[in-house]
Image (spheres, rainbow, N blue to C red):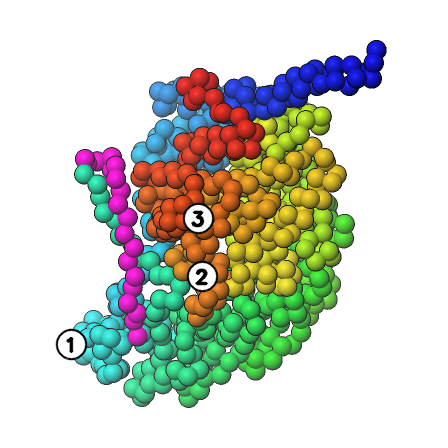
Amino acid sequence: MSKYYQIYGLLPIILVIWAIDVSAQGSVADYRRAANYRESTRDKVCYSPGSFSWVADQPRFWYVHQTPKGKEFVVVDVAGHKKVPAFDHERLASALAMASGEQVEAYKLPFNSIEYVEGNRIALRAFDKKWHINLSDYQVTDKGQDGEAERPRGYWGARRDDRQGPPVTSPDSLWVAYIKNDNVYVHPVGKPKEEIPLSFDGAPGHYYAAAIAWSPDSKKLAVNKVRPNTSRTVYFVESSPADQLQPKLHERSYLKPGDALPQYQPTLFLLDTRESFAVDPGLIDNQYSLSRPEWRKDSKAFTFEYNQRGHQRYEVFSMDATTGTVKPLITETSKTFIDYSGKKYRKDVNDGKEIIWASERDGWNHLYLYDGETGVVKNQITKGEWVVREVVHVDEDKRVVIFAGSGREQGQDPYLLQYYCVHFDGSGLTALTMEDGNHRATFSPDFTYFVDAYSRIDEPQTTVLRSTVDGTVVMELEKADISALEATGWQRPEVFHSKGRDGVTDIWGVIVRPTDFDNRKTYPVIEYIYAGPHSSFVPKNFVLDPSGMAALAELGFIVVQIDGMGTSNRSKAFHDVCWKNLKDAGFPDRIAWMRKAAERYPYMDLTRVGIYGTSAGGQSSAGAVLFHPEFYKVAVSSCGCHDNRMDKIWWNEQWMGYPIGPHYAECSNVENAHRLQGKLMLIVGEVDDNVDPASTMQVVDALIKANKEHELVVIPGAAHTSGGPYGERKRRDFFVKHLLGVDPPAWEGW
């Protein structure tokens, strides 16, 4: 056989094999697997309870989990070290069916929560009613209609009118304080005609707020005087309301970056002498916010917190209740931003004689102990190149802090939560958990014990009961069984890390593969992105389909998620990358991470990279194809805050700063829409009151003016959304068409 025939005679066969390989991705079978992914993996993980409820005033707790039988409730007697079924599931199902007239299956009970009430009785809610069941004889009592009706969804941005509020009675019940004609008045209880004005300078444009704070001794009042702002209103048209033919116009009060804010001035009133003392406005100028006054228990002073606009100065002040003298107790400053919205923690100890305060002043989020009277730092409680994530409990008597932290345990993913305790003076730091997993602790009411459920995205859950003294395991409770899940062909996600843009810092993420993964094939890579600086987002617990990544992978993709620089829960320097630069979104780190992953796994085809995200992720996913078109080729952006001047004030000024400057325009997807080179789909809900939908429409307008091809999907009646089932189908089809080069199957055909 000639060499020519050996090479070229085999070429058609090779091409056929290649064609079969490609056509196998994005097929009808793949679409069916993607659509059925969650159902096919449902209830396939056993012995992995999601939450734990301690019984009030008793050393026991209960939980519910999936077992081979179905859903089972378990109660744990801590004192006796016993774990037993919470009740006889068969008897309870039979009794509830008899009482309700409904069909009830023992291991598919129509409730997920129980409450222990008097004696050996439990309360539960099922079939729109509340029931009491005596576990001694399984007698069921119908307690009538369930009073916990679903509350209507409130608007997150609603601002209370601080001029409105009821009269406030003094702690000794002798006086009533209230606002009248924008001023502060009091009168003896039951004698409204004997009213006494305490202020005279209130006016409609500069009034006293109705939130009046009496001192515990009933001799003083603290009230904020308010210079109000002018609110901004955004409007939405609901095109297809369910209850009428014609469209509806909706409006919301919605402040945006740069808008004017109300200014507050704490004022002290002395009831006996009728004197008043106001805080010098120069101490608290240009406020982003000012907290309500909080009195010390001894009535000698009250405190308030001042957040200067721009979030580079945050102070805790104290006002002497006799002289009106104001002094700073804590002054926090930053050249970039103070993460007041995510990391602020303050605990006043012994009526404010000491204060525990969280700060990133040494480059990592740690706890400090202050002298609450002088404002001097007594000592740093925690320190090191790791971060405090949450203060769980402060024991003032034992002078011990229980907290969650991450990044301290060497050789572990630095985002994994571990629990610790430490003395106020910083001594005796004790790790209560150490296993290589993300720990979720549920403490007993007296903080003697805690249930520890730990897992990783690639390792199923273990559940134990521990002592809070030193973390000793008191009882082993559950070990998750995933054998049924593995039988479905489920692919274990892979935790992957590599160096970031600086060649030094580790960047962590996760790789998700399809159930029919074949390392002989090549796969386009799709990144799910959420780069909001307020947290970190790569899943750390054992979950099966985070953000739809696993289902999307079924279509023939490798799907990844990464926490790049600019996100939270690492060092301050790591976080500061986002400041005045949200368009960065950690992209240099993300791209470096994917390139390193592709070096290890050549089947990851980085010539075909897609990206999708919602909200801040919508901004970043669109930004990927505008600012990094050499790497990202296809993007689906849902409800993006595409121009930070168009979005809510608190989130955007926190990271982009104040005043508004050219950097806002530099980060804008609207201003940079002309850069588009790849394929872009925009999805938006028409009545989104989280991110103004006009932000998406302005991108569309700019793309049209730049003659850039794109797709727009508007979901009628939808609020802040990734698109719902319809949007999910559109997103999948868009990636299949533009990354796999396959025409998606007709929706009606599968």
Q: Quadrant of residue 715?
A: top left
Q: With respect to residue 3, does 290 lie above or below?
A: below
Q: From mark 3 to mark 1, how far is it between C-alphas?
A: 57 Å
Residue 235 in magenta stretch: yes
Quadrant showing the N terminus: top right
Q: x, y (%) of residue 677?
A: 51, 45
Residue 139, image quadrant? top left
**Earlier sequence position, callout 3 versus callout 1:** 1
Numbered tag placed on residue 640 in the rendering: 3
Around disc 3, counting alpha carbons within 10 Å, would you say few (fewer than 14), some (14 to 19), or many (20 or more)? many
Is residue 85 placed above or below 470 in the rendered structure? above
Residue 232 percent across, percent down from the top left: 30, 61
The local secondary structure at tag 2 comes to helix
The residue type indicated by label 2 comes to: Ala
The label nearer to you, 3 versus 1, is 3
> At 64% from the left edge and 57% from the top edge, which residue is drawn?
570
**Residue 665 vs residue 43, the one in the foreground:** 665
- Which residue was labeled with disc 1? 193
Compute the Cα span from label 2 to label 1. Answer: 59 Å
Q: In the rendered view, tell whether residue 103 sits above or below residue 169.
A: above
Decide if residue 61 is on the left or right side of residue 285: right
Task: Measuring from the top left, give residue 655's x and y in whole percent.
Answer: 50, 62
- The residue indicated by pointer 2 is 665
Q: Earlier in the sequence, mark 3 or mark 2?
A: 3
Reading the chain from its start, which is encountered first: label 2 or label 1? 1
The residue range painted magenta reads 227-245
Horizontal arrangement in the rendering, residue 504 relative to residue 617 (left or right): right
Q: Nearer the viewer, mark 2 or mark 1?
A: 2
Counting from the top left corner in percent of width and height, residue 342 is at 52, 59
Above-or-below relation of 727 to 59: above
